[in-house]
Structure formats: C-alpha cells, structure tokens
Image (cartoon, helix red, strand yellow):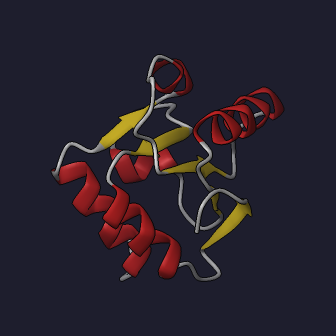
Amino acid sequence: MENCKTLTFIGFAIKARKVRTGVNAIKTLKGGVYALVLCKTASKNTVDEAVKLANKFNAPLIISNAYKIEDIVKKEHCKLIAIQDQSLSQAILNSLDGRFQNYSGGIT
C-alpha cells in the first residue's frame, strides 16, 4: 500500500488496540466509538447496518474507496471497523483525501 496519512492513523489505532472489527462486534459496544470506516465492497445490508451504528454512536461514517478494509486490518471478510480513540479519529477525519470520503455526519 502506498503512503497515506489516513492509513497511517488507522494503523496507529490498530497498534493501540483501539479498533473493533466487524458489524456484530461493533453492535455489542455501549459507547466510545468516534469513527466508523466502511469498505467500498460492503453489501447493501452492511451499509445499512453501518449507517444505523453511525447514528447510534453519533460518529462519522467514512468510506474507503481505494483500499479494502480486510487488507488494512489483515482480517478476512472484514467490511467495517470502529475507531475507539477520539484523537486518532479526529486525525483520520482531518486527513481524508480521494481515497477515503466522509459518508455521513457525526461530530466533527
């Protein structure tokens, strides 16, 4: 993968163990989700669930246009991740470019 600030910040969150992977795992969280990152290859049902989760946590939903989420987190068939660190999620939002786009609101 090429050099991308957004990927770097997601990598920092992974190293800090501040990422939850998968729709079902994210559904079990009570709070503390500051951003959701969705793969562009996700099915319509997964997109609908991601939008519901973004509304539940009042978190921005980011679409990965250039990279598959499963390649980023190295977990097969993973389509959605939750960032659980506020400063890293803000850094991710500030570094968005054409490879990632903000799909829906949240607190910015």
Q: In the drawing, does residue 60 fall left or right of residue 83? A: right
Residue at left 65%, top 33%?
Answer: 56
Task: Count all numbered tags in the image, as a single digit.
Answer: 0
The quarter of the image holding the C terminus is bottom right
Residue at left 27%, top 55%?
Answer: 13
Residue 28 drawn at (x, y percent): 47, 16
Residue 52 against residue 61 in the figure, above or below:
above
Location of residue 20 (image quadrant) = top left
Residue 21 against residue 88 in the figure, above or below:
above
Residue at left 69%, top 52%?
Answer: 40
Residue occupying the far left of the picture: 16
The quarter of the image holding the N terminus is bottom left
Residue 38 drawn at (x, y percent): 61, 48
Q: In the drawing, does residue 62 fall left or right of residue 44? A: left
Residue 1 against residue 28 in the figure, above or below:
below
Residue at left 54%, top 39%?
Answer: 80
Residue 15 drawn at (x, y percent): 17, 52
Q: In the drawing, does residue 70 fall left or right of residue 45? A: left
Residue 97 drawn at (x, y percent): 59, 83
The foreground one among 72 and 31 is: 31
Q: In the drawing, does residue 20 fall left or right of residue 93? A: left
